[in-house]
Amino acid sequence: MAHASDPSAGAAGLGLAGRAAFVALPATALAALLALLWAHELPLRASWPWVPAAGIELAFLIDGLAALMLLMITGIGTAVFVYAGGYLAGHPQQARLYALLTVFMAAMIGCVTADNLFTLFVFWEITSLVSFLLVGFDHEQAASRRSAQQALLVTGTGGLALLAGFILLAQAAGTSSISALVGVVPQLPASPALVAALLLVFIGAFTKSAQWPFHFWLPNAMAAPTPVSAYLHSATMVKLGVYLLARLDPAFGHWELWEWTLKAVGSLTAAWGMVLALRERDLKRILAWSTVATLGTLVVLVGLRGEGATIAVGALLLAHALYKAPLFFVAGNVDHGTGTRVIDRLGNLRHAMPWTAAAALLAGASMAGMPMSFGYIAKDAILAAKQAGEAALFARAANTVFGAIAVAVAAVAAIRVFWRHPGANETPPAHEGGPALVLPPLVLALLGIVLGVFPFVVQDLIAEASVAMTPGTEAVALALALEAGPALASLAVTLAVGLAVFAFWDPLHRALEWLGARLAPLAMAAHYERALRAIPRLAAGCTRALQHGALPGYVGMMVAAVVLALLSVGGAVAAAWTWPPVSLPSVGVLAGALLVVAGALLALPQRDRLVLLLAAGLTGYGSALVFLFAGAPDVAFTQFVVESVFVVVVASVLMKLRLRGYGAGLVDDGPRAWRALLALAAGVGAAAWLLLSVATPFDAALADFFGARSVPEAHGRNVVNVILVDFRALDTLGEISVVMLSLLAAWPLLQALARQRDWGARRAAPAREEPR
């Protein structure tokens, strides 16, 4: 990527006025939100009809949880927009980045304020699509394209699962309003539909928030420019899954499946993410894996019971945004100022980049949970929540791993890069960025320290978020949670283990790299790559199997699909089946049925196409007779015409082919046993459905309807004619169209017969004498 200082930067990007105009968008949104929160009490609601027939509304809700997310979206967004102006100064595609970030911000606002499942889903998918474009911003590079594709496939697949879950959930609960679901679902039994909906929602939320086993896409998304990484993959989008789980927690929190799934998956993600951070040498990827671990911790906290857990969720959401976004900015500044993010080549950058070093130190202190930082308060709330919520032993161990390695990662970003010179590695020439690169990380990191000293500034906001996650409760314990400090022993252990990991980072990295190379085939990323390579092979195999060019095979597949549909639907209603009363059919119906059977039996042994056509035509004429004597003369007439034209046209084609030496007989393309079985299954299925239909008591509602309305509404006493001309006019038009098309199909043959008759007449006429 070309920076402002690069001679290859090409055409100039946006000017100062253009960048200021884009920065004004999130800044204005932030100011409007603060004014709204100051002037009104939460919650705030608004709704408009969208799809009334399906009960879907454009419904929006701003409560404490939504307000907390909105402050992060607009606040961090303002810092990101300022930073992007400096990071991509002079880039010819800077306006495109700003436009995509603006659309993304609007979609995020829609997600966290939506109070309808399907409204939320629309904005959810917009974030995935815009994320694809942002991750692939440098689309000239193959790595960016691959990372964007992976992010879209993983989160997009999860989005499809989420849509299916929302549909099942709305059907089971009878409403798609999220606020109503929270009150309705706890009163419902754990039906299979609700369990399926819950599992599908898990898939959607876990893919979005990079939970195991979908965790691998997030570090690979670091191919995106640093402003994108700081905004999407640290502070906002990846927290959507956590937000959705927190929003639905009041509905499903009493389910053991919900609680233990969140505890298990979140704990595994937290521990595994921090371990994988030790394998990295790229500073952005190290921070990305620590973000995965934080997301896992948030999922665990959502799964814990009690008010303390919701307090911890709100505090960690805010603390993580305030220290991780600045650290991503720091990584971008290091890359911008040195040309590399590999920690082996970095050290002692504090002299060349003092402001960035200060921002890294402040944000690192908050990430490590040092006193006088908001990260300290968040980790204190986490510790209290896990003690009160009876977290599993593995969850406690995962939290210990997370806390210790978080200290080590913070030390790598704040101390190793800026205050140490490890080994004999050479630090590349470095320079500090301009105000647009320095102020955003410094302001956000300093805000994390200020809130640690004065937590009462956000105390009410986190209290409102806690109430939103546990409706009907009072957040009276918040002040105590913020004032109480963590146990000194726990803090000392975390710091000691974290500093030990930092001291032995390189040996641990080598050991994990050795182990990872041997376990690479078992990694989820490897399974993803194998699945991706298998898709073309599977598609080619399906194409060869299904698109083979043999008409009998296509017919067989269509008949098999019909049989499967008959059996599957018939099985659902078979319990209501009773043997219908037996009555002798009329002579005409019996004759038609015998003609159908005779035609089918005569067609079986035939090998000549023309004879086969004529024998099969008997079944059509037999069906027409059945319609005629069963009281459907219009259908019978249409059947007679179509069958006659079809037989005549196809017979003419076959005779022409035979005269030219083609199509004398059928090609024997394999055993016919499976065809006989398929035909038998189709016949049995159709017969069973007919018996089921006849056995069902006759519903006279339609007959009564037409009889009562024929005269007053259609002004006709012949009910059949009224039905055909008025009530079923489109159906009658269709039948007329079929007859007309049949005539058009037969017209060339009729013309050929007329020409042949005229030619024969001219040959038979006596020659006239010529005058002498």
Image: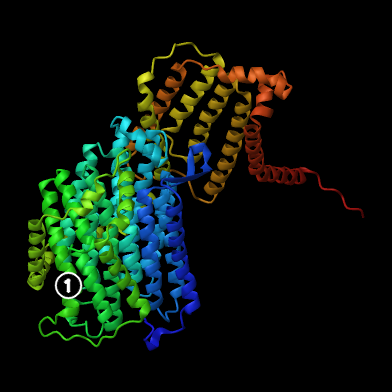
- Location of residue 606 by image quarter: top left
- Residue sitting at 28 percent across and 69 percent down? 446
- Pinpoint residue 396: horizontal percent, then vertical percent: 12, 51
Could you tell me if residue 535 is visible in this image? Answer: no
* Left or right, 717 with reference to 357: right
In the image, 197 versus 428, the foreground residue is 428
Q: Residue furthest right?
A: 772
- Pinpoint residue 158: horizontal percent, then vertical percent: 33, 51
* Left or right, 350 with reference to 127: left
In the image, 325 versus 288, the foreground residue is 325
- Residue sitting at 56 percent across and 45 percent down? 653
Within 10 Å of the Cα at label 1, are there few (<14), some (14-19), or many (20+) other Cα atoms? many
- Location of residue 505 by image quarter: bottom left
* Left or right, 559 with reference to 592: left
Figure check: 590 above or below 29: above
- Location of residue 388 by image quarter: top left
- Pinpoint residue 428: horizontal percent, then vertical percent: 22, 86
Residue pointed to by mark 1: 412
- Residue sitting at 42 percent across and 50 percent down? 113
- Pinpoint residue 110: horizontal percent, then vertical percent: 43, 53
In the image, 731 versus 599, the foreground residue is 731
Q: Amino acid at mark 1?
A: Val
Could you tell me if residue 457 is visible in this image? Answer: yes
